[in-house]
Every structure is written in C-alpha cells, then in structure tokens.
Image (cartoon, rainbow, N blue to C red):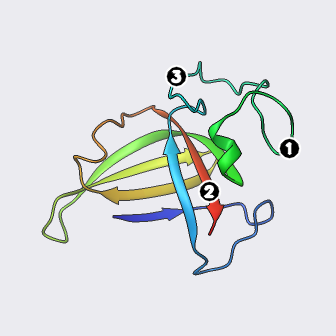
Amino acid sequence: HFEQVDINVEVYPMETGQKFRMALASTLNPDGKPDDGNFDQTLQWDGHPGRPSLMDDYEYVMYGKLFKFGDDHASGTPKVEVYVSFGGLLMLLKGDPKKLEELEINSRLYLLVRKV
C-alpha cells in the first residue's frame, strides 16, 4: 500500500521521514455510529471537555471528501487509487481493491494522525 498526503505543517509540524500513525474513519464516534456530516461541538477535542471521540487518540484531524477513484496496473498487481480532498490538502492512497472496497465517491472521511 502507498500513501501520499498533504499536512499543514504550520499547524502540525512534521519532518520528512518522520514516523506517524494514521487512520481513516467515516465517523469520530468510538462506537462507529454514523454522524450527520457536521462537526459535533459536544465532542472532546484538544483539551476541551465533552463526549469521547476518536480524536482523543490523535494529534491532528482533517475532514474531507473522496472525489476520485483510479486503477493502477503498472506493478502487475491490480491496485486501486483513492483521492481525497481535505479542504484543498490532498491524499492519494493506493492499495488492494478488496481492502478499499467500502469506500465510495463523495464519502466523507476523517484523517487522524499522531506521531510515533
């Protein structure tokens, strides 16, 4: 699997080669319950009290939309390419089509990151 992601390093400084943990989620609810697509102000975040959320375990979170799928057969092994825009910051994710089959065009996704 391959990923390329834009990070606003003015907000969340990172160095080239720095190791990090990343997750993609369709909701911030720890139980997986879908949200309505709007940021829930009652969630706990960045030291603000509130309901627990997936943000509790990460340092940097972006919200975006899957806008394009592509196929990559160059390696001889079929891979799917997934393109997501987080307000202009972009992510390209390449991987096994079976592992990315639940994603759909216009899916709303959270990208969660923390340094390790």
Image location of residue 18, percent across then percent down? 61, 77
Q: Amino acid at mark 2?
A: Val
Q: Please give the residue where the numbered disc 3 appears in the rendered image.
A: 33
Q: Secondary structure at mark 1?
A: loop
Q: Earlier in the sequence, mark 1 or mark 2?
A: 1
Q: Which is in the foreground here, disc 2 or disc 3? A: 3
Name, please, the residue furthest toward the top.
36
| Residue 7 - label | none
Image location of residue 71, percent across then percent down? 24, 54
| Residue 47 - label | 1
Residue 87 visible in the picture: no
Quarter assignment of residue 50: top right
Residue 92 visible in the picture: yes
Q: Secondary structure at mark 3?
A: loop
Q: Please give the residue where the numbered disc 2 appears in the rendered image.
A: 113
Q: Nearer the viewer, residue 72 or 53?
A: 53
Q: Amino acid at mark 3?
A: Lys
Quadrant where the image shows the N terminus: bottom left
Q: Earlier in the sequence, mark 1 or mark 3?
A: 3
Q: How far apart are labels 1 and 2 at the CA level?
A: 17 Å
Q: Residue at x 30, y 58 (%)?
A: 95
Q: Residue at x 54, y 57 (%)?
A: 22
